[in-house]
Image (cartoon, grey):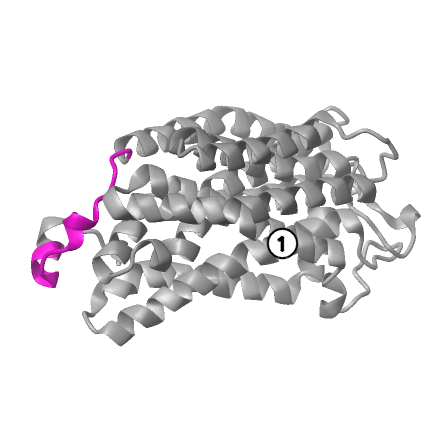
């Protein structure tokens, strides 16, 4: 069991990182679709860049939660009880995004579509903000007693570090989404996406550098120098700023991918061997070992993961390859009935 506990902590960190890499640019597109697409055809084109992908990307969140439940039930129980109301808010945001994708195009009325546009934008901001606050609170600490029960209130979740983590992830998602749109759109939409990326990049860079320093100070590792993952996050976001300024969309998207991945990994690296820090007493910290499942379920889960995870990764890679083509506003500029016949997509809005 001792060998499988750190293995499953790494698996869960991998799942959360994969979720933010993939859903991160989805969130960014949701935030920016109205700014990049100035008219209805443009907004439809922006949404269609992630139309075939967004629901598959959200599965990573479900798998990450399920893995936590199965591998670390003590962690799952305490975390999900502490973030009870926050999880309701997260679900509302995710459901609102999903409904916007599905229902935006059901009517041609301007007010109808603008309402769903606002819900898509709001949900795309709220979701990474809430998840960021939750991840930040794991490291900063929450009131937890000796029985591993959360003893605080909803408002105790809003720690300064947790809030800043959420804001940082929102900014990274915005930059990640802008570079993705620059890769996936054409003509004036591509140019607007690049302009937004250049405007967001300085703020994202400053936020990531501050976040990494704050994360390092918050960590219990008590080392003066940043670890390699933390250094990678800073270098990657600086590279992303330079690359978007140089109008190199593909390389910039790769840099934002490394940025968001290294920021998430840095939280888990600085957290381990803890899974939740107790602000009441350090002796009450939840650790990977005191919250883990028994040896047998971990062994079964390991076999299943080794068999199925490569299949899932291969299938999702194939999906991205199939839908690699750029999306043009011109595809959606025809009359509503004609455009639906030319490019039917129930998620396209």
From the viewer's perspective, is residue 118 above or below residue 288? below
Residue 185 in sight here: yes
Give the SS element for disc 1: helix
Task: Residue at 89%, 54% (x, y): give it.
Answer: 146
Residue under the image location 31 percent in, 43 percent down: 190
x and y percent of residue 231 in the render?
Answer: 69, 29
Q: Magenta segment range?
A: 324-339
Horizontal arrangement in the rendering, residue 165 relative to residue 334 (left or right): right
- Quarter of the image for the C terminus: give it: bottom left
Is residue 39 toward the left or the right of residue 97 in the image? left
- Above or below 138: residue 21: above
Q: Looking at the image, which is closer to me, 78 or 33?
A: 33
334 falls in the magenta region: yes
Q: Could you classify mark 1 by the number of other residues whose Cα lies within 10 Å: few (under 14), some (14-19), or many (20 or more)?
A: many
Question: In this rendering, would 253 be left or right of 213?
Answer: left
Total marks placed: 1
**Observer-nearest residue: 215 or 311?**
215
- Residue 153 position, x and y percent, is 76, 69
Q: Quadrant of residue 229?
A: top right
Residue 348: % across, % down: 26, 54
Left or right, 210 with respect to 29, comes to right
Q: Is residue 184 located in the magenta-colored stretch of the structure?
A: no
The answer to whether residue 25 is seen in the rendering is no
| Image spot of residue 166 (x, y percent) | 62, 54
**Residue that numbered label 1 is attached to:** 166
Residue at (34% x, 67% y) in the render: 116
> On the rendered image, what quadrant is the N terminus found in?
top right
Q: Quadrant of residue 266?
A: top right
């Amino acid at each position: 069991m001792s060998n499988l506990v750190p293995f499953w902590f790494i698996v869960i960190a991998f799942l959360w990182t994969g979720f933010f890499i993939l859903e991160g640019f989805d969130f960014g597109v949701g935030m920016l679709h109205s700014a990049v697409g100035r008219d209805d055809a443009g907004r439809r084109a922006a949404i269609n860049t992630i139309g075939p992908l967004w629901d598959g990307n959200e599965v990573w969140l479900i798998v990450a939660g399920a893995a936590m439940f199965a591998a670390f039930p003590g962690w799952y129980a305490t975390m999900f009880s502490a973030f009870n109301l926050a999880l309701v808010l997260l679900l509302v945001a995710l459901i609102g995004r999903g409904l916007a994708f599905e229902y935006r195009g059901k009517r041609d009325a301007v007010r109808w579509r603008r309402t769903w546009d606002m819900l898509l934008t709001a949900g795309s901001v709220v979701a990474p903000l809430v998840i960021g606050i939750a991840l930040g609170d794991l490291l900063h600490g929450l009131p937890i007693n000796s029985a591993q029960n959360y003893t605080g209130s909803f408002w105790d979740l809003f720690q300064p570090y947790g809030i800043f983590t959420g804001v940082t992830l929102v900014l990274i998602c915005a930059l990640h989404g802008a570079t993705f749109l620059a890769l996936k759109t054409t003509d004036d939409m591509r140019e607007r996406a690049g302009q937004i990326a250049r405007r967001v990049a300085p703020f994202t860079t400053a936020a990531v550098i501050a976040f990494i320093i704050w994360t390092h100070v918050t960590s219990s590792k008590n080392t003066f120098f940043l670890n390699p993952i933390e250094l990678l996050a800073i270098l990657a976001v600086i590279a992303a700023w330079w690359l978007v300024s140089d109008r190199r969309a593909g390389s910039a998207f790769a840099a934002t991918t490394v940025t968001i991945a290294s920021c998430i990994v840095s939280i888990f690296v600085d957290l381990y061997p803890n899974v939740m820090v107790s602000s009441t007493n350090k002796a009450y910290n939840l650790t990977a070992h005191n919250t883990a499942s028994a040896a047998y379920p971990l062994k079964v889960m390991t076999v299943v993961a080794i068999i199925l995870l490569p299949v899932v990764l291969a299938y999702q890679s194939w999906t991205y390859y199939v839908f690699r083509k750029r999306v043009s506003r011109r595809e959606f500029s025809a009359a509503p009935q004609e455009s639906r016949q030319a490019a039917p997509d129930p998620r396209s809005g």
